[in-house]
Amino acid sequence: MDNIAQRAKSLEKELIETRRFFHQHPETGWFTFFTTAKIIEKLKTYGYTLKMGREIMVPEARQGVGSKEALEEALLRAKELLSPEEYTLLDVMEDGLTGVIAELDTGREGPCIAFRFDIDAVDVTESKDLAHRPFKEGFRADIDGIAHTCGHDGHITIGLGLAKLISEHKEDFKGTFRFIFQTAEEGTRGAVAMEKAGILKGVDYLLGAHIGFQSKKSGGLICGVNNFLATSKFDVTFHGTSAHAAGAPEEGANALLAAAEAALLMHGITRHSQGITRINVGVLKAGEGRNVIAPNAFMACETRGVTTELNDFMKEKCMNILEGVSKIHSVGYSVKDVGGTSGGDSSPLSLMCMKKQPLPLRLSTRMTLSKHAILAHVKTLHTLCKRYKIKVDKVAI
């Protein structure tokens, strides 16, 4: 294990370069074509078995895929960034079947451990302020409107670095390692279609992490998350009737007013005594002209709750509001679910560690090859416990 730690340290410069490379070329949602292709190229050199496209995803189960125009624009950009040899990989990604699964079998019986890393960026424009380090040092996003502001460029880098380390030290492990590089995490869209394809079949342990989440200082490590908020993402389109605002306003049905009233009422939903709830209308677009009764309106909304039931409470209230304002303003409306996830907690062991409760921990010989390897694990555990002030009552081999 000391050899692995030393090797990990030696990769520091490479990892920084990798992270900055992906930071400079962000892609969003399902359209992570360039990102996926580059991840695939690296994984190939590490000796992993790869699965892509329809092997890892059920296309019909995707939510919030995006427009055909956005797809074509993303594909064109990817082709410009990739070499002719690399963009042949785009065929299997079709209309956004991006992401990749990489697996390494050590050839020795043991558990299947899966690691999950999200790879998509966020729909925001990165700063051009001289105080902003990526801009100052030349690795700011090469496109406006998309940026890695949520740390997924770091997640990609961690995943590739870990994959490289495990492949280089394959003889030190038993079992199978599976790396899940998932797209469309933003908006909680990507996991459902991949899970339905059976990517977790045979997995004994599933590990995931997020940079900067809950830690109060740089270098902090949070083991497990409790009461992770459930969420629903949905788009609302109002269908009104156009009319001249001065000549015949009574003939119109104002979709803009319906959307504005719905937004205000949603934000006024009574909060719940049983736990945290949230609501946000993040986008509202409406209308066609200054003197025209707005015949259309669009809202991008999300609800959250500390439990699935509380999130359902918030969404139900939103649906009631939409029905009510549509009748008041004589407009039609449609709702499209574009993402969501239920609430959940990390495994009990990780939560016990987070809460500083006594943590029974057993190191299985299935994970090592020899007594020397077991002792290396124990030494590493001792170092971690000392660093994080965790009391160890007994160690038995």
Image: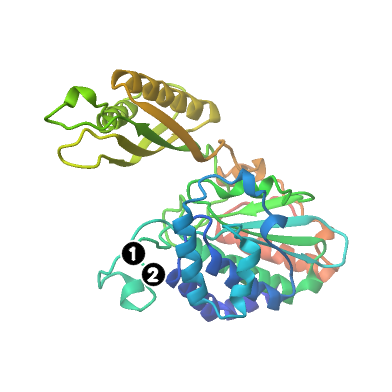
Residue type for callout 2:
Ala
| Residue lying at the far left of the rendered structure | 246
Residue density around tag 1, few if under 14, some if 14–19, many if 20 or more, within 10 Å: many
Q: Is residue 349 left or right of residue 29?
A: right
Q: Which mark is residue 141?
A: 2
Residue 229 seen? no
Residue sitting nearer the eye, 370 or 392: 370
Residue sitting nearer the eye, 198 or 155: 198
SS under mark 1: loop
Residue sitting nearer the eye, 78 or 180: 78
Q: Is residue 43 left or right of residue 286?
A: right
Q: CA distance from mark 1 to mark 2?
A: 7 Å
Residue density around tag 2, few if under 14, some if 14–19, many if 20 or more, within 10 Å: many
Residue type for callout 1:
Glu
Q: Is residue 134 above or below residue 211?
A: below
Q: Which mark is residue 41?
A: none
Residue 304: x, y in percent? 45, 35
> On the rendered image, what quadrant is the N terminus found in?
bottom right
Q: Residue at x 19, y 22 (%)?
A: 250
Residue 202: x, y in percent? 79, 50
Q: Is residue 197 above or below residue 36?
A: above
Q: Quadrant of residue 192?
A: top right
Q: Residue at x 48, y 46 (%)?
A: 187
Residue sitting nearer the eye, 126 or 75: 75
> On the rendered image, what quadrant is the C terminus found in?
bottom right
First-in-chain label (1 vs 2)? 1
The answer to whether mark 1 and mark 2 are in CB contact below 8 A is yes
SS under mark 2: loop
Residue 21: x, y in percent? 48, 75
Residue 236: x, y in percent? 40, 35
Please give the residue where the numbered disc 1 appears in the rendered image: 126
